[in-house]
């Protein structure tokens, strides 16, 4: 029966991590932590960027929680496991699908993955740390809502860039 509680803790942690990650992205990475995150919003060469240090910090926290849980603090190892699962999903979706940091390329043409892909493209359509939309990594609001927010904040220029990106995806 304990395995059900453990699985539930992992699931709730994965969901909670999306909330934590979106808030950290908006208020830390696009706030006082912009120095590291800037590397993610600029073109770069090579496998790594300074922004990857955020993933290292979250991984270190997950390892610490798993260790403390294995030493007898029951729920912590399962919270650490949920954080690890979220990290794997983040790596697959954000780094692999959205930013194409894998050797193979796949651009989604419809459904959930296209919405995630386009929402993150809209996030990067704005230069600088302010005025961005869609700070989540595994959840994206409807594209029409994001386009309306961008249009309201920045006018037709950013909206035209987002529309061009969407047409480029449709062509592939």
Image (cartoon, rainbow, N blue to C red):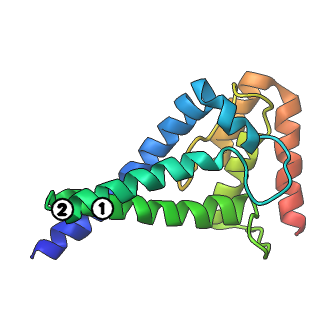
Quadrant of the rendered image containing residue 79:
bottom left
Q: Residue at x 73, y 49 (%)?
A: 49
Helix, strand or loop status at disc 2 = loop
Indicate which disc, 2 or 1, sits on the residue closer to the N terminus: 1
Image side of residue 156 versus residue 11, left or right: right
Quadrant where the N terminus sits is: bottom left
- The number of numbered discs placed on residues in the rendered structure image is 2
Quadrant of the rendered image containing residue 3:
bottom left
Viewer-proximal residue among 1 and 61: 61
Quadrant where the C terminus sits is: bottom right
Residue 71 - label:
2
Counting from the top left corner in percent of width and height, residue 10 is at 30, 63
Q: Residues within 10 Å of mark 2 (few under 14, many from 20)?
A: few
Q: Is residue 30 above or below residue 167?
A: above
Q: Residue at x 73, y 23 (%)?
A: 153
Q: Is residue 27 above or below residue 16?
A: above
Q: Residue at x 49, y 60 (%)?
A: 87
Counting from the top left corner in percent of width and height, residue 36 is at 66, 37
- Residue 141: tell me if it is visible: no
Quadrant of the rendered image containing residue 123:
top right
Frontmost of labels 2 and 1 is 2
Counting from the top left corner in percent of width and height, residue 73 is at 15, 57
Image side of residue 25 versus residue 13, left or right: right
Counting from the top left corner in percent of width and height, residue 45 is at 86, 54
Task: State how far apart marks 2 and 1 are (Cα).
Answer: 9 Å
The residue at which mark 1 appears reads as 66
Image side of residue 124 versus residue 89, left or right: right
Residue 153 - label:
none
Viewer-proximal residue among 152 and 3: 3
Viewer-proximal residue among 68 and 5: 68
């Amino acid at each position: 029966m304990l395995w059900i509680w453990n699985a539930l803790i992992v699931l709730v942690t994965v969901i909670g991590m999306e909330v934590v990650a979106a808030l950290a992205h908006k208020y830390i990475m696009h706030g006082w932590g912009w120095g590291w995150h800037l590397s993610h919003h600029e073109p770069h060469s090579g496998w790594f960027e300074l922004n990857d240090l955020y993933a290292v910090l979250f991984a270190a926290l997950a390892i610490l929680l798993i260790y403390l849980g294995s030493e007898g603090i029951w729920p912590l190892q399962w919270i650490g496991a949920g954080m690890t699962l979220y990290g794997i999903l983040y790596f697959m979706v954000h780094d692999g699908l959205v930013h194409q940091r894998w050797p193979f390329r796949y651009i989604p043409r419809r459904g959930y993955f296209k919405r995630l892909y386009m929402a993150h493209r809209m996030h990067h359509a704005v230069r600088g740390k302010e005025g961005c939309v869609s700070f989540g990594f595994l959840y994206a609001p409807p594209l029409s809502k994001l386009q309306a927010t961008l249009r309201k904040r920045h006018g037709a220029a950013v909206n035209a860039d987002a529309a061009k990106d969407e047409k480029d995806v449709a062509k592939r």
